[in-house]
Image: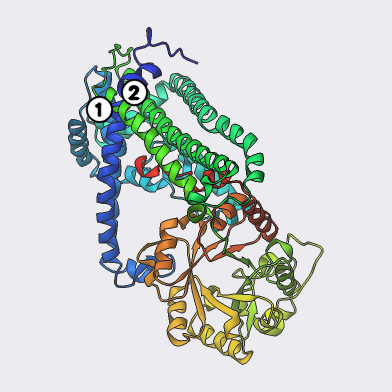
């Protein structure tokens, strides 16, 4: 690991932190203050573009793609990407270049240079790079990225299919290897465009040439730098998060026992026990807020220093000689940063005091999310089986979800896939077979190889649920059309179970038709992506893929008088996140884990609650 001695290394981490970091911190604050209103303005235009249909989602996008609004939306999204690229990569890179020349960095000059450099990317090769930066980098995890698309992802239900199919997994692995190779070749792309005035096409060749000729030096320097910065992050986490947690955990059991009946507000000042409990709440809130603040500041410091050293490496390689060291200029804002840090500690103390007094109304929340068993019984029974209904009801699920398709002769059966190949070894689809043929199939769920069962009909599934739990009926596949909607509503009405079902689908066209013509039925649309005013969609429940759910979106949907569900949650982190939120439904395969995580959350101490709820408290200052 390289020495970080400030006397011998003019680019040492300590010298950077003490002398230069205030400039990057101020620029970060400036960028946050600029990007927030600009992003809100652009998103208002996006909502205006999608106002005709309420929102553009994975369930209703085809008509939108054929209209003039689609290229307009692309232009607005490109504008947003340019804004984030300017503030998060281009301007900071120019700041680093100025520092390496021994110059005092200037925000305005860096932004002006960044704006001018944007024109260089307005070429076909430049737009390809922007696509790579905004979409492919977040997927591969390799390369500089912007926060606008940092959470861009392959939906979990797609990744699960990829992982379960060897051929898909092989193709996915090859794609990841290609993106890794591409990220390696494009490592110095932006530096070549900005600092050597290359065209995007020439920048790709220049970056490829540099990494090819200097691969061992690049690998050595970046690995050592990565290890050092990782050690810095771990040390900060140790002193500001882990050690305070150990201290509070060692004290909390006795405090919680003595203050089991402590209230809130002024009640906490009446006895010594309650005053001790108040102090514990204050210490817990202070430790969590300060720890997260220091983690965020350290992240900004390490990312800024990485860009400085990466830029230094590029300049050294491009000149094929050692970069002449220039002492990093001392920031005139060092005193300001110290004052702001002191004020931040005071602000954290103030917030902690408020939290200590108002802990119950702010953080004690009843877990209202209802569990919906995916494919009838989740992991407890063969998928979409009558046994799954009984298993999910016994496990305490509020509802079961199942998939309905129409047969060749107009009956309605339960099957998830487009064909019966996975469960019965038959490649034929439900619409190509009559009910008698389908009933003759022998199904074997790979997770229950010793159990055989037949394909249930919709009527059989409804009978199994009657009076026990609700049934979320997904209109599925090629037969998810108006005829299916009409027939399913008729079947449910004939069984007098209108209040015991929810009609859902990935097709917004079908759900819009159902909600319009059968308003007495509860309806929900399944989404894994969407922009615009989602609550305007004509349905009762919005069922979102788990990665697309945020607290802001939950509040927006509830404010419109609608419900929100999330699918398909199968891990401990996801259960904790959504049980601790205000979502109405959680669709899951793992009802056992869901119950365990619900019990864990109910037994949390105040420190654990604050740690979960305040984890992202400072994100608004750090993108």
Q: Name the N-terminal-most of marks 2 and 1.
A: 1
Q: Where 6 falls versus 168 (above or below)?
A: above
Q: Left of 172 or right of it: where is 617? A: left
Q: Position of residue 435 (x, y in %)?
A: 68, 84
Residue 99 is left or right of residue 373, and the answer is: left
Badge 2, how many Cα within 10 Å: few under 14, some, many 20+?
many
Residue visible at 21% across and 32% down in the picture = 107
Quarter occupied by residue 335: top left
Snapshot quadrant of residue 138: top left
Outermost residue, top direction?
8
In the rendered image of this protein, does residue 494 appear above or below residue 121? below
Q: Is residue 113 visible?
A: yes
Q: Residue at x 46, y 85 (%)?
A: 519
Answer yes or no: is residue 359 visible: no
Drawn side of residue 524 relative to residue 575, left or right: left
Q: Residue at x 62, y 56 (%)?
A: 570
According to the image, label 1 marks what residue? 195
Whether pointer 2 and pointer 1 mark residues with C-beta atoms closer than 8 Å, the reply is yes
Query: Toward the viewer: 20 or 257?
Result: 257
For this orientation, the residue located farthest to the right is: 450
Calculate the distance from the C-alpha at mark 2 to the C-alpha at mark 1.
Answer: 10 Å
Q: Residue furthest bottom?
A: 494
Q: Position of residue 53 (x, y in %)?
A: 33, 72
Residue 307 image point, x, y percent: 36, 28
* Label ID, residue 314: 2
Relative depth, front residue between 429 and 387: 387
- Percent across and percent down for residue 27 are 27, 34
Element at label 1: helix
The quarter holding residue 164 reads bottom right
User: Foreground residue, 466 or 422?
Assistant: 466
216 lies above or below 601? above
């Amino acid at each position: 690991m390289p020495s970080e001695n400030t006397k011998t290394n003019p680019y040492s981490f300590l010298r950077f932190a003490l002398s230069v970091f205030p400039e990057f911190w101020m620029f970060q604050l400036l960028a946050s203050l600029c990007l927030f209103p600009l992003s809100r303005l652009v998103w208002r235009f996006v909502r205006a573009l999608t106002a005709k249909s309420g929102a553009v989602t994975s369930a209703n996008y085809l008509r939108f793609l054929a209209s003039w609004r689609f290229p307009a939306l692309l232009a607005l999204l490109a504008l947003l990407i340019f804004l984030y690229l300017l503030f998060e990569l281009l301007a900071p890179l120019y700041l680093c270049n100025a520092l390496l020349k021994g110059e005092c960095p200037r925000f305005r000059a860096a932004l002006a240079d960044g704006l001018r450099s944007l024109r260089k990317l307005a070429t076909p090769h430049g737009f390809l790079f922007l696509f790579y930066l905004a979409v492919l980098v977040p997927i591969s995890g390799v390369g500089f990225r912007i926060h606008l698309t940092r959470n861009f992802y392959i939906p979990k239900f797609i990744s699960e299919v990829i992982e379960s199919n060897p051929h898909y997994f092989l193709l996915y692995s090859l794609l990841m290897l290609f993106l890794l190779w591409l990220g390696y070749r494009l490592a110095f792309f932006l530096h070549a465009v900005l600092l050597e005035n290359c065209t995007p096409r020439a920048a790709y060749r220049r970056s490829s040439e540099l990494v090819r000729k200097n691969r061992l030096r690049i690998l050595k320097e970046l690995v050592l730098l990565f290890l050092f910065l990782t050690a810095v992050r771990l040390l900060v986490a140790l002193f500001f998060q882990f050690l305070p947690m150990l201290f509070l955990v060692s004290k909390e059991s006795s405090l919680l026992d003595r203050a089991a009946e402590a209230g809130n507000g002024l009640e906490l000042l009446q006895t010594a026990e309650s005053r001790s409990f108040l102090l514990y709440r204050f210490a817990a809130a202070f430790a969590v807020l300060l720890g997260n603040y220091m983690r965020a500041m350290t992240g900004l410091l390490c990312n800024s220093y990485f860009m400085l050293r990466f830029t230094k490496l590029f300049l050294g390689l491009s000149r094929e000689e050692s970069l002449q060291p220039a002492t990093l200029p001392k920031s005139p804002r060092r005193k300001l940063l110290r004052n702001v840090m002191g004020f931040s500690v005071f602000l954290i103390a103030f917030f902690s005091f408020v939290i200590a007094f108002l802990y119950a109304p702010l953080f004690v929340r009843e877990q209202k999310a209802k569990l919906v068993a995916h494919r009838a019984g989740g992991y407890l029974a063969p998928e979409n089986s009558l046994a799954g209904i009984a298993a999910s009801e016994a496990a305490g699920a509020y509802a079961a979800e199942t998939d309905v398709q129409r047969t060749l002769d107009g009956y309605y059966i339960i099957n998830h896939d487009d064909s019966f190949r996975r469960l019965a070894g038959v490649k034929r689809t439900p619409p190509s077979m009559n009910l008698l043929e389908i009933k003759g199939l022998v199904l074997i769920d790979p997770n229950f190889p010793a159990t055989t069962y037949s394909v249930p009909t919709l009527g059989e599934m409804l009978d199994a649920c009657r009076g026990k739990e609700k049934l979320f009926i997904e209109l599925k596949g090629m037969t998810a059309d108006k005829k299916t909607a009409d027939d399913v509503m008729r079947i449910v009405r004939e069984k007098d179970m209108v209040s015991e079902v929810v009609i859902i689908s990935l097709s917004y066209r079908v759900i819009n038709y159902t909600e319009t013509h059968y308003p007495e039925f509860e309806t929900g649309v399944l989404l894994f992506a969407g922009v615009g005013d989602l609550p305007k969609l004509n349905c009762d429940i919005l069922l979102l893929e788990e990665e697309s759910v945020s607290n802001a979106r939950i509040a927006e949907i509830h404010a419109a008088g609608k419900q929100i569900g999330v699918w398909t949650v199968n891990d401990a982190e996801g259960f904790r996140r959504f049980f601790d939120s205000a979502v109405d439904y959680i669709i899951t395969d793992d009802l056992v884990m869901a119950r365990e995580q619900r019990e864990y959350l109910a037994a949390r101490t105040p420190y654990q609650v604050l740690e979960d709820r305040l984890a992202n408290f400072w994100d608004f200052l750090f993108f």
